[in-house]
Amino acid sequence: MTVQGPIEFWRGFINGTRLTKDADTYACDDMLTYQVAPTIEKVVNVTETLFGMTDFYEIVYVLFDDGLLLTRLMQLLHPTAYHCYYAGENTYWHFDDVIVVQNGYSPKPYLMNIVYNFGHIWDTLRDFYLFWAEDPRGQVNSVHDAGYNLGFGLYLLITPGIASYQT
């Protein structure tokens, strides 16, 4: 498992839920994907090379490279924490709006979605499970797609008005 795995899973989940994204959500996504995760992987790789070295000056050179990468991570700490905090708040308010405001604590939208979207919900959750079970029957090939399937299943379950039915 790499550092990129959980980030890709979360990105897929957010894309699957059709979350209303704001500037902080995009900034958090970009910073984690294109700056933080690659820098962490570089720190791990540079630190691993230290254990095979014998030349003192080469070790010092690699330690300075490692320190530079760690400084870059510390530089990214505040903006990443800031944007990801507000992205999480946006995610909370999105689900609060769908579950509390639009559905109004009524079980009817959930039951109607289960009845009318059962096949789609089943397919998404089955593909999510088959990805983790490493079953060749699964159609999912990446961690992003597994997160997308889980998020899309949740979207099909909680979103009111997507099933066409007469009341």
Image (spheres, grey):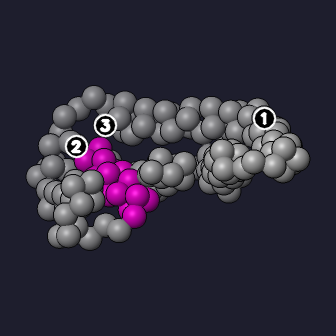
Residue located 32% across and 51% down the image: 150
Q: Observer-nearest residue: 118 or 123?
A: 123
Residue situated in front as seen by the camera: 159 or 128: 128
**How busy is the neighbourhood of tag 2: few (under 14 within 10 Å), some, or many (20 plus)?**
many
Q: Give residue 63's quadrant in the image.
A: top right
Residue type at tag 2:
Pro
Q: Is residue 132 above or below residue 104?
A: below
Q: Give the CA distance from mark 2 to mark 3.
A: 7 Å
**Going 39% across and 33% down the picture, which residue do you hit?**
101
Position in image of residue 6 (x %, y %): 47, 47
Q: Tell me the SS state at disc 2.
A: helix
Q: Residues within 10 Å of mark 3 (few under 14, many from 20)?
A: some
Element at label 1: helix
Q: Are marks 3 and 1 in contact (CB under 8 Å)?
A: no
Magenta extent: 142-158
Residue 17 falls left or right of residue 110: right
Residue tagged 2: 109
Q: Nearest to the eye among marks 3 and 1: give it.
A: 1
Residue 68, image x and y in percent?
84, 44
Single out the residue that lies furthest toward the front. Answer: 54
> Residue at the spot x=37%, y=30% of the render?
100
Frontmost of labels 2 and 1 is: 1
In the rendered image, residue 156, in percent from the top left (x then y), is placed at 28, 53
Q: Residue at position x 39%, y 64% from top?
A: 142
Identify the residue position indicated by label 3 in the image: 103
Distance from the alpha carbon under mark 2 to that under mark 1 = 46 Å
Residues at discs 2 and 3 in contact (Cβ within 8 Å):
yes
Mark 2 or mark 3: whose residue is earlier in sequence: 3
In magenta stretch: residue 151: yes
Q: Which residue is mark 1?
A: 74
Please state which amino acid type lies under the numbered disc 1: Met
